[in-house]
Image: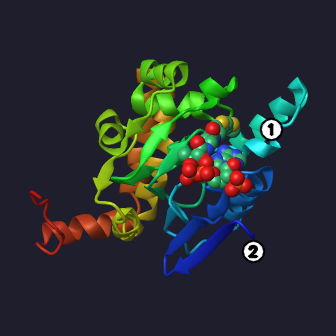
Amino acid sequence: MNHPDIRLELRGAIALVRLARPAKRNAISDEVILGIRSLFEQLPDTVRAIVLDGEGEHFCAGLDLSELKERDAGAGLHHSRMWHAALDTVQFGPAPVIAALHGAVVGGGLELASACHIRVADETAFYALPEGSRGIFVGGGGAVRIPRLIGEARMADMMFTGRVYDAKEGERIGLSQYIVPAGQAFDKAMELAERIAKNAPLTNYALMHALPRICEQPADQGFLTEALMAAIAQSSPEAKTRVREFLEGRGPKVKKS
Ligand code: 1HE
C-alpha cells in the first residue's frame, strides 16, 4: 500500500497507520479518505490490532477545507457517503483500532477518532467541531458516533458555540478513554494494541461487530444477540483452553492495578 499522505508499518501482528500530511495538519482530502478506505480494506489478515496516529503537532485538522468547493446537494451527499464508507472500514475492519491523539482532534479528525475502538490522548490534545462556525455540518458519521461517546447535548453545544475541550476534559466526558503525558500517546496505544492482539480473535470480533449492534437493538433483541454471540465465543477451542488454564492455576488472575 503506497500513499503519499498515509504510512503503513507492520510490526508483527500490529499495523501502524499514520496520517502523514503534517504541513496541512493532516487535513483529510478526498485522496486521503479514499486512501484510508483502501488501506483498511487491504490490511493483511495477520493483523490483530491497529494503532492510528498523526505525524507532526496535530492528530488531524479535519476535512481539507481547500476542497470544499461549490458542491451541489447531490455531490455533497455522495461526498459524505464516501466518508461513511471509509470510516466504516475503520470501525468494522479486520481488527480493533486504537487512536493515539495529540494536538488538534477537530472536525473530521474527531469523526475519524470516533470510528476507532479506543482513544488514547496525550495532554496536548484538544477537541472541537468547527463545522458549526464554518456554516457546515458534520458529514463523516460524527452525528451518529460522537453522541454515543459524549451525548447529544454536549455535541450540539460544541457545534452551537465552538466549544473546545482540552485533553483532561475530553477524558472526563468520554472523548478519550485514556490520558497520558505529552508525547506518550503512541507508546500507550502500542501497549494496549499488544494486549488486545493477544485476545481470542472471536472476543475481539464480538466487541467490534456484535456489541455496537446490541447497543442499538431493543433490549429483548439485544439479549438474544448477546446469548448467540456468547454461545459462539465460548464454544471456540481457544476459549476452552483459556478457561482450562485458569482452572488448573496457569491462567492469569485479575489483579487490582
Ligand atoms: C488546512 C486545514 C484544513 C490546516 N483544511 N488546510 N477543520 C477546521 O476548521 C480546522 C482548521 N484548522 C485549524 O483550526 C488549525 O489549522 C489547527 C488548529 C488545526 C492547527 O493550527 P496551526 O497554527 O498549527 O496551523 P495553521 O497555520 O492553521 O495551518 C497550517 C497549514 O495547514 C495552513 O496551510 P498553509 O498552506 O498556509 O501553510 C492551513 O491552511 C492548513 N490547514 N487545517 C485545509 N482543515 C466529513 S465532513 C468534516 C467537516 C470538517 O472537518 S470541518 C472542520 C475543518
Q: CA distance from mark 1 to mark 2?
A: 25 Å
Nearest the eye: 7 or 14: 7
Label 1 beta carbon less than 8 Å to ligand 1: yes
- Between circles 1 and 2, the one closer to the viewer is 1
Locate residue 82: give its quadrant: top right
Nearest the eye: 228 or 47: 47
Is residue 112 in view?
no
Q: Which residue is mark 1?
A: 68
Q: In the rendered view, does 257 fall on the left or right side of 128?
A: left
- When the figure is inspected, residue 32 is found, relative to residue 129, above or below; the finding is below
Nearest the eye: 17 or 71: 71
Q: Residue at point 46% right, 52% down?
A: 103
User: Given the image, on which type of amino acid does mark 2 rest?
Assistant: Asn
Locate residue 106: give its quadrant: top right
Q: Position of residue 33 (x, y in %)?
A: 72, 52
Q: Residue at point 33% right, 63% down?
A: 239
- When the figure is inspected, residue 135 is found, relative to residue 60, above or below; the finding is above
Q: Which mark is residue 144?
A: none
Label 2 beta carbon less than 8 Å to ligand 1: no
Q: Position of residue 93 (x, y in %)?
A: 60, 55
Is residue 168 in view?
yes
Q: Residues within 10 Å of mark 2 (few under 14, many from 20)?
A: few
Q: Residues within 10 Å of mark 1 (few under 14, many from 20)?
A: few
Q: In the rendered view, does 104 fall on the left or right side of 89?
A: left
SS for dot 1: loop
User: Given the image, on which type of amino acid does mark 1 rest?
Assistant: Leu
The quarter of the rendered structure image containing the N terminus is bottom right
Q: In the rendered view, does 5 fall on the left or right side of 96?
A: right
Q: Which residue is mark 2?
A: 2
Q: Position of residue 161 (x, y in %)?
A: 50, 20
Q: Residue at point 40% right, 56% down?
A: 203
Of the residues under marks 1 and 2, which one precedes in the sequence? 2
